Image (spheres, grey):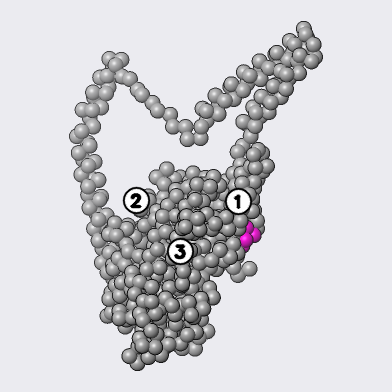
Amino acid sequence: MALLRAYRRFVVVAYQFLPLLLAYARDRRRFLLFGGPRSVDSETRRRRAKKLLDSMLTLGPTFIKLGQLLSTRPDVLPPEYVEEFEQLQDSVPPAPWLEARSVLEEDLGPVDERFDEFDTDAISGASLGQVYTAEVDGQPVAVKIRRPGIEELVRADLRVIRFSIPLLMRFVDEARSFSLETLADEFEKTITEEMDYARERQMLEGVRENFVDDPHIRIPRSVPSHSTGRVLTMEYVPGTKISELDDLDELGVDRHELAERLQRSYLQMLIVDGVFHADPHPGNLAVQDDGTIVFYDFGMSGRVDAFIQEKIVDFYAAVAAQNIDAILDTLIEMGTLSPTADRQLMSDIMELAIQDARGDDIEQYRVNQIVNQVEDTIYEFPLRLPPNLALVLRVATVVEGVCVTLDPDFDFIAVATEYLRENGFLEDSARQFVEDRAREARESVESVFRTPPKLEAALDKVNRDNLAVDATLVDQRNVFDRLAKRLILGLLLTGTVLSTALLYAFSSPEAAVVPAVGSVVVGGLLLLSFRKQRGIRATPQFTRQNLRERRDE
């Protein structure tokens, strides 16, 4: 039965996505089965992204969540799609109260007996659940109830996504296939965890415990007696939405201080505590009258292992020192950058990113220079995103957006550097740097004594004509393969032209038709082999400065 529902759902999903898939297929082959690729401009990509966004809204909760996940994956989608998908928030009309009540009473019992009061009008409707206000023992609480029937729909949609991955792989290049292959597993894990309210309560209490002594951070307390796997009851903590700047100004809140407090709280979660709130969009962050930040909705949350924590520290330390080589080495160690990447190009990009993060002015000619270098190979770009870093990236990008909204001149690097120094991380990094240099010096001294005997032995072999050298040629661009094909096509062309001439001269024109046609075909193939291959082009946005300028326009 479940499999049959998945097949029915597959037909519905295919109907929504088929026109776009055909358009993408024509981008690779203009006439589907033959023809060269066609270029796609930014306006076309944005138009397609809007259509895809509408399709996801039509398909419902699972695909809304998928769109939210994709909005944090610039390694999978071009920037136009990421920008459009950022609009996907959990603003879905709530299910009828009677349906939600059935879930609530199945898990907790009669509403009138378990709650002193219960407002049946939902205060928020999300793709997977909805929130109501109530009272327990005279205390105001918020009650989050999982959307009725959502489990069966999600299971069917996950099957559809699994069916679709092999098909989608035909429309992406090898570089992006790394991210796409892990996307289904990552999404299944994320949405399954988010539907488990028992896990959410555990994560909420874990983060709350870490901030219990911080008077500027408020995390609602859960009510275990009224919570299950499908129902989560917690204290009701009102506040002003963090993106309501005018209201914050009326409260007299220092927005720069608020942005700094927000970033520091996430640095603590990621680097110190190892457990973090992973959905910091403005709808899940509020501010109380005294400037206290309130965190809501821990459905999307995660843990950071010690290795990633160490590498995050190394990354911030390298950025603070503006050590580009150390930044690239850290990205490679975390698995987010291919070891075969063009280091000079990546160095230029990192320099621009650091300038932008510091709020420095960036010369437009440098931006254009980098864009031109990358534009032809954007879909083979060496950046990728392992699953264990997906939520960390989401936190970094969303928190950055919130902080810039609060204070357009906010300096992330200065705040992160100060935080690391206060907590002793930079001193540890400096000591590690000294230890690394000392080890390198020791190894250099040892090599001074090891090298001369080896060099003398090598020279003796050369003197005796007893030295053999094995060389391996790395041909990543298939130069030799193309050269061999051209030689073969050239020989075939020579043979067919000679045959055509001989048959035409010594036999009849009709007999020369077949080799003549062969000459035309082989000649065409030979000509095509000399044409420069074109790929799908994109205009990447490497700096937030460019993105802000486009939004202002």
Q: x, y percentage for residue 171?
A: 55, 47
Whether 70 is among the magenta residues is no
Q: Which mark is residue 21?
A: 1
- Helix, strand or loop status at disc 2: helix
Q: Quadrant of residue 239?
A: bottom left
Most distant residue in the front direction: 1
The residue carrying mark 3 is: 152
Asked whether the beta carbons under mark 1 and mark 3 sit within 8 Å of each other, the answer is: no
Whichever of callouts 1 and 3 sits on the residue coming sooner in the sequence is 1
Q: Is residue 286 visible?
A: yes
**Alpha-carbon span between mark 2 and mark 3:** 39 Å
Asked whether the beta carbons under mark 1 and mark 2 sit within 8 Å of each other, the answer is: no
Q: Which mark is residue 333?
A: 2
Whichever of callouts 2 and 3 sits on the residue coming sooner in the sequence is 3
Q: Name the residue rendered at 46%, 72% in the picture.
A: 148
Q: Amino acid at mark 1?
A: Leu
Q: Vertical placement of 290 versus 150: above or below?
A: below
Q: x, y percentage for residue 276?
A: 34, 68
Whether 48 is among the magenta residues is yes
Q: Amino acid at mark 3?
A: Glu
Q: Name the residue rendered at 62%, 18% in the picture.
A: 491
| Residue range highlighted in magenta | 47-51
